Image (tube, rainbow, N blue to C red):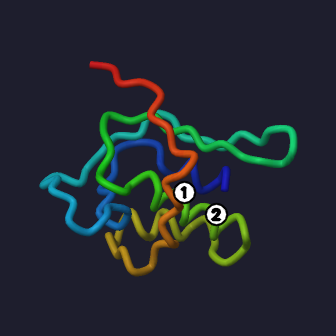
Amino acid sequence: MTAAAALLLGEHDFSAFRASGSGNRNPVRRIIAAGWQTHPGGWRRFTITGNGFLRGMVRSLVGTMVEIGKGKAAPELLAELLKSGERRRAGPTAPGRGLYLVKVEY
């Protein structure tokens, strides 16, 4: 999952990771930081910083990376999805519980 998160850095078209009905016309976003931390008790936290996010983008990214962590997909899948924009190949959308917006900067 850590290797997959590193592939997110930079500017990419996140069409493969947006929810249906997303009103954003431009799916290109720049990710400044993305990574996983493991905490006592075995739970993990994903943190991502970018210049904006599409509707459902982070939840879809997390769901895809969890599939990679379970060995159901290779980390390279993330890079392939960023290039192809194929939503149907992405992992399931992670549930919204536990998702927090920490800060917005302008």
Cα separation, mark 1 vs mark 2, equals 6 Å
Between 33 and 98, the residue placed more toward the observer is 98
* 10 Å crowding of disc 1: few (<14), some (14-19), many (20+): many
Residue at image position (12%, 55%) is 25
Residue 2, above or below 94: above
Residue at image position (52%, 60%) is 95
Asked where in the image residue 68 lies, by quadrant, the reply is: bottom right
Between 6 and 41, the residue placed more toward the observer is 41
Kindly identify the amino acid type of the residue bearing the numbered disc 2.
Val
Q: Give the numbered dot on residue 62.
A: 1
Location of the C terminus by quadrant is top left
Local SS, label 2: helix
Figure label count: 2
Image x and y of residue 64, in percent: 54, 66
Q: Give the numbered dot on residue 105.
A: none
Location of the N terminus by quadrant is bottom right
Is disc 1 in contact with disc 2, using a CB cutoff of under 8 Å? yes
Residue at image position (71%, 39%) is 37
* 10 Å crowding of disc 2: few (<14), some (14-19), many (20+): some
Q: Which residue is mark 2?
A: 66
Image x and y of residue 67, in percent: 63, 70
Asked where in the image residue 10 lies, by quadrant, the reply is: top left
**Which residue appears farthest toward the front when viewing the image?**
97
